Amino acid sequence: MSEPRPPEPLGDDLARLAELHGVAPSYSPAPGRTVAASAGAVVAALAALDVDASTPDAVRAALTAREEELARRLLPPTVVHWTDAGLPEALTALPPGTRLTVETEQGETRTGADGLPPGVHRLTATAPDGRTGRAHLIVAPPRLPTPPRRAYGLLVQLYSLLSRRSWGMGDLGDLGELSAWAGRTLGAGFVQVNPLHAAVPGAPTDPSPYRPSSRRFPDPVHLRVEDVPEYPYLEDPADRARVAALLERAARLRAAVLDEGALIDRDAVWDLKREALEAVCRVPLGPGRRAAYAAFLAREGRALTDHATWYALAERHGPDHSRWPEGLRDPRSAETARARTELADRVDFHCRLAWLTDEQLTAAQRAAREAGMPVGLVHDLAVGVHPDGADAWAQQDHFAAGMSVGAPPDAFNARGQDWGLPPWRPDRLAASGYAPFRQLLRALFRYAGALRIDHVMGLFRLWWVPQGRPPTEGAYVRYDAEAMLATLVLEAARAGSTVIGEDLGTVEPGVREALVRRGVFGTSVLWFERDWAGDGLPLPPDRWRADCLATATTHDLPSTAARLTGEHVELRHRLGLLTRPLEEERAEAAEDVRTWLRVLGDLGLLRDPDGPSGQGRSREEEEIRAVHRFLLRTPARMVGLWLPDAVGDRRPQNLPGTWDQYPNWRLPIADAEGRPVTLEDLAASPRLRALTDALRAGVTPEA
C-alpha cells in the first residue's frame, strides 16, 4: 500500500460539487479541529458515484448539471413521512396546486399523502405546469418497539460454544439449548450472538464473522445436521454408511478442540457438514415439507436464486468473481442464466441449505421465547460484506466500485483503518426506495427479538477509502439518515423487535440524539463510561443512559478477568503490540483497575476495594460480580454478560491489530486455566450460577 501523502486542496467548485452529492469536503477528528479531505479522495468518491470530476472543466460541467437537476426535479428519489408528524418538507414545498397520487404497498390508490398506513409506497406528484415527479414514500411509525421489561442476557460468539453434540464448533442446536436453559433456569431475557451471515468459501475461509460473503442469508455451517427433519430417513445404504463415518470424524474434531487444545477449524467442520448435508438433501421431501420449501423459494425470490447461483459458480470457478469468465461476472447476463441451468442441482442444494438454516434459526428463537425470554435472540448485523462475496456480485449495482469502508485517523489510530468492505451507494439506495436494506432487515428480523447493528454510525455516513490508497486519504460520504432510520424503524416495528446500535468510539454530534429519538438503543461498556467532560473519573451509575445495552466487555476487548489481573497487557506485550514501555502500560492498567475497584467499594458493591486485585479465584469472582452489580445500578434497560466472563476466561475472542499473530475467532470458551468449557460444563458451573444469580436478583420486572 502507498504511503500517506498530504491532502491536495479542494477548489470551491469541487467542494460544492462534492457536497451536492453527499461527499464531505472535510471532517472533524476531534472537537474544534477540522481537516480537509484530499482532493484525490473526493474525486475518487465522486467517480464511484458516476460523477466525473477529473479536470476543472469536468467539475464545472458536473456542477452545472447537478444544480440544474436539483432545480428541475419535483421530488427526491425517496421521501420519508413519520406518522406522528406533519407532511415532510419535500411535499409541503411543492408548487401550489400540485396533485399527489399514492399507490400504497397494500395495493390501494389514494389521492393525497395524509393518513397513509406504514409501508413503502409509490408517490406521484403532478405540478400545474405539467412537470411530474415520482418517489418512494416511506411511511414509518415514530419509534422502535422497546423491550417489555428490563432484562439481563448472555453475550456469546456461537462458534465458541461447543456442546458434546456439536461438530467441532457451536451450532444452532447449541444455541437453542443455551437459550432454553438460560431462560428457564437463569432467568435471562436474551442471548446475543455474533453475525451468523454466510461466509466466503475458501481454503482457509476468513474466520471473521464481520466480513461475510452475504449478510442477506445465514451460513449453513451453523446447522445441526441431526436436527434436519430428513436426517432420520436416509435410505441409501451408502449414504447411511458415509454419514456414520462423518459423525465419527466430527467426534474426533470435537475432541481435538475440547480435549487436546486444538483451535476451532471452521473449514474442517464445513467439509464434514457439507458432505453429510448432500446426503440428507437426497432424501425426498414429503408433501408438507415440499410445500414449505416452495413457499420459502417464492418468498425469497430472485435474491435467493442469485445467492445460490453465486455459491454454485464459486464451487466451479473460485470465490473471486473478478476472475470468473467475463460473462459470469454479471448476475443478469445470458451466460449466467445458462450456467444457472447447467448447475441447477447445485443451485437447488444451496437454496435448500438456506431454507434449512432459516428453519433452525426460527426454531432457536422460538425456544428462547418459549423459555420465557422477553427478547430472545439478539442477532448481529455486520457493517458490510466481503468485496468478492455473493452480495457484492448479486447487488453490484448498489455497491461503489473501487472503494472500501474504513475509519479516518483519530486519537486511537493515527493511520486510520481500512476494513476491506465495499460501501453501498447512497444514490442507488435512494433510487430503489432502500430495497436492499429493507430486504436485509426483513430477513434478519424474522428470527430476531432484537438486532445489534455494528457501527450504527454508518446509517449516517461512512469513510470511503479509494482502492490502493491508505485510509488517511479517504473521505466521508453521507447517507440519507432519515430514510435509513425510517426503513429500520418500519421493519423493526413490523417484527416487534428492538434495535441496539454499536455506537462506541468517535460519534459525530447529533447522531446519538437522532438514534434516541427513534428508539435505537446504544451500547455502553463499563471501562469506557467516564466523565470525559469533567474529571475523567468513572461515570456514576445514575448518570448512565437508560436506552442502552450495558456490558463489562465485548468480543473485541479483554475479558473482565484479564483486565482485572492485567493479563491483557501481558498478552499485547508478548505479541509486540504495545506502543509504550511495558512498565508504563502495566502501571496505567493497574491504576485504572484500582480506580474502578474504589468506585465499586464506595457504592457498597465490593468488600475491601483496596485489597490485592485478582489474587485468588474467590477474590476475582467477587470483583467480577461487583462489576456486574454496578451495571445493574445503572438505568440501562438491557444488561449483558459476556459468557466467557462467567467462567473466568482470560482470552479475547478477537485482538484488533492482529491477523496470524493471534487465533482470532477460533477459540472455544475456556475457564481461568484455559481449559475449554462445554455447554454442559456451563450448566453445571457454580461460578456461573453465582454470577447469574446476582444478575437475576438485580433485574426486576417493571410494573
Image (spheres, rainbow, N blue to C red):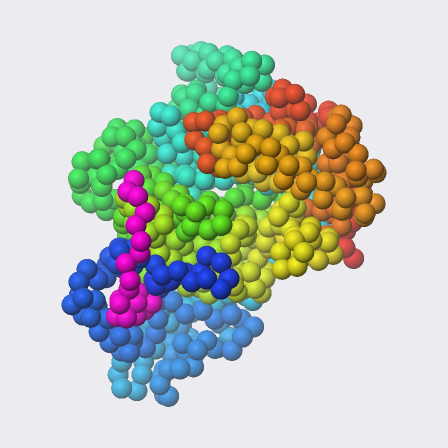
Horizontal side, residue 533 vs residue 635: left or right? left
Residue interval drawn in magenta: 1-20
Q: Nearer the viewer, residue 395 or 265?
A: 265
Work out whether residue 522 can be spotted. yes
Residue 606 sits in quarter: top right
Residue 174 drawn at (x, y percent): 59, 29
Is residue 121 positioned above or below 38 on the image? below
Residue 283 drawn at (x, y percent): 42, 24
Q: Residue at x 68, y 29 (%)?
A: 648
Determine if the magenta segment contains residue 347: no
Q: How many circles with numbers are drawn on the protein?
A: 0
Q: Nearer the viewer, residue 245 or 514?
A: 514
Residue 481 drawn at (x, y percent): 45, 63
Q: Residue at x 24, y 30 (%)?
A: 317
Q: Residue at x 46, y 45 (%)?
A: 413
Q: Residue at x 39, y 29 (%)?
A: 205
Residue 126 sits in quarter: bottom left
